[in-house]
Image (tube, rainbow, N blue to C red):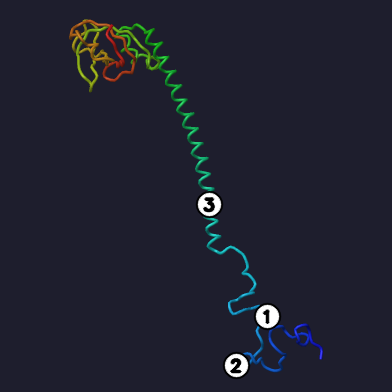
Amino acid sequence: MIVNSHGHPPGHPPGYGPAQHGPYQGHPHGGYPPSPGYGPHGAGRPPPKKGLSAGQVVLGIAIAVLVLGFGSCLVCTRYTSTKFKEAAGDFVEEAEKRAEERKKKKANPKRMELKELYALYDVDAGAAEKLLDDYVLVEGEVREIGKDGVRTFLVLASAGASADDKVSLKCTLRLSREAKGVEVGNKVVVLGEVAGRLVHIELNDCSVE
């Protein structure tokens, strides 16, 4: 009889004693011997297949969305910040330009008669509109001194005009102290910025010369 190095016939699994015929005798119910290399605790089993679970996939997608969203948010913030700075710069530049133009107009006012200025709105509305924001020097007689909120104003009429004469000018003073010493009936010359005509010719930023 041919035996291998373990003393068993060829093809007989090592470690199971002498070759047996028929049902496996090592188990009370018979059967076939266990497969080699698999112990009672799964020793020798092939390792589980590697892969991502559904939870890991969802978590990865969520992280990707957050990262992309945050990056987009940073881009939007930087873009908005840049545009805001540009707009603010343009606004400041425009304000400085207007202030300079206003300063020049105030330094070179147009001298006009009150009646002439008042009638201009009836005769030539286009010419009157061109006077908006221009500074004028006007002489008149003080009809009223009053308060418009915190601002002091003077209402002037042409010298010698009757009480029914509608030709008048309302001059809102830049500083209340400009009215110091001024009384109703006084003749004064005022410098102010033309703001249009409502009941009166309206001048803003006025001073008494």
Residue 191 % position (x, y) = 31, 9
Spatial CA distance of label 3 from label 1 is: 50 Å
Q: Name the N-terminal-most of marks 3 and 1.
A: 1
Q: Which is more toward the observer, 141 or 12?
A: 12
Residue density around tag 3, few if under 14, some if 14–19, many if 20 or more, within 10 Å: few
| Mark 3, secondary structure of its residue | helix
Amino acid type at image mark 3: Val
For label 3, the residue is 65
Which quadrant does the N terminus fall into? bottom right
- Residue farthest toward the right in the current orientation of the protein: 2
Amino acid type at image mark 1: Pro
Spatial CA distance of label 3 from label 2 is: 61 Å
Residue 35 % position (x, y) = 67, 82
Q: Name the N-terminal-most of marks 1 and 2.
A: 2
For label 2, the residue is 28
Amino acid type at image mark 2: Pro
For label 1, the residue is 36
